[in-house]
Structures are given as C-alpha cells and as structure tokens.
Amino acid sequence: MQYQEFTRVSVEKLMTGTSDIPPLCKARPDYERQCSICGHGPVVDLYTMDGQFVDSSDMCGVCAFGRQDCREPSHWPA
Ligand SMILES: [Zn+2]
C-alpha cells in the first residue's frame, strides 16, 4: 500500500464494512480516478475538517458508502 504514511484507520474502517466515514474526516470527490471495485468515478478522498488530505478510499461513493444514491458526491454523508 502506498498510503501507509497516512492514517490508515480511515480506509481500514471503510474496508471493514462500516459504511460511514470517520467522524473527523469528510469526503471529497476525486474525478481523475476510478473506483478499484466497479470502475466508476469519482473516487472518495478523505480530508480532515481542516481540509488536509488524509487518504483515498480508491472506491466510488456507491462502493465506499454502500448506497446507490451515493453515486453523486452531493449525496455523500460528509
Ligand atoms: Zn465503485
């Protein structure tokens, strides 16, 4: 994994099935990358509330949050 220097907790939380993102992070869309699972974009990137990049989930909103209506970034929970 290339993101090991960042806080891995956030992505591990996403990967282990909790469909909500960590409370201290917010999701922002990355339109230049595609989901590692379904190939759609944008990909969910995680930022702190201060706007610092934390990590990328490598997944689109649908796969990261487990809800079809999360395809649109405006519907993401954070
Ligand atoms: Zn996906």
Image (cartoon, rainbow, N blue to C red):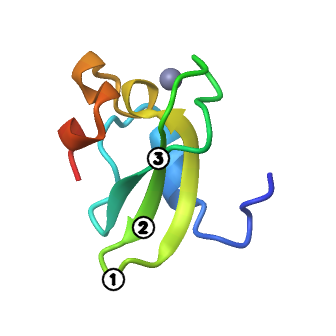
Label annotation for residue 47? 2
Residue placed under numbered mark 3 in the picture: 13
Label 3 – label 1 distance at C-alpha: 20 Å
Q: Quadrant of residue 25?
A: bottom left
Q: Amino acid at mark 2?
A: Tyr
The residue positioned 80% from the left and 57% from the top of the image is 2
Is residue 52 placed above or below 75 in the rendered structure? Answer: below
Q: Are marks 2 and 1 in contact (CB under 8 Å)?
A: yes
Disc 3 vs disc 1: Cβ atoms closer than 8 Å?
Answer: no
Q: Residue at x 36, y 37 (%)?
A: 18
Depth check, mark 3 against mark 1: the one in front is 1
Q: Residues within 10 Å of mark 3 (few under 14, many from 20)?
A: some
Residue at disc 1, secondary structure = loop
Residue type, numbered disc 3: Lys
Give the Cα separation between the discs numbered 2 and 1.
Answer: 8 Å
Residue 16, labelled with which disc? none
Horizontal and vertical percent for residue 75?
19, 37
Amino acid type for the residue under numbered disc 1? Asp
Circle 1 residue: 50
- The residue carrying pointer 1 sits among few (fewer than 14), some (14 to 19) or many (20 or more) residues within 10 Å by Cα, namely few
What element does badge 3 sit on? Answer: helix
Q: Residue extending furthest front?
A: 32
**Could you say which is closer to the camera, residue 43 or residue 26?**
43
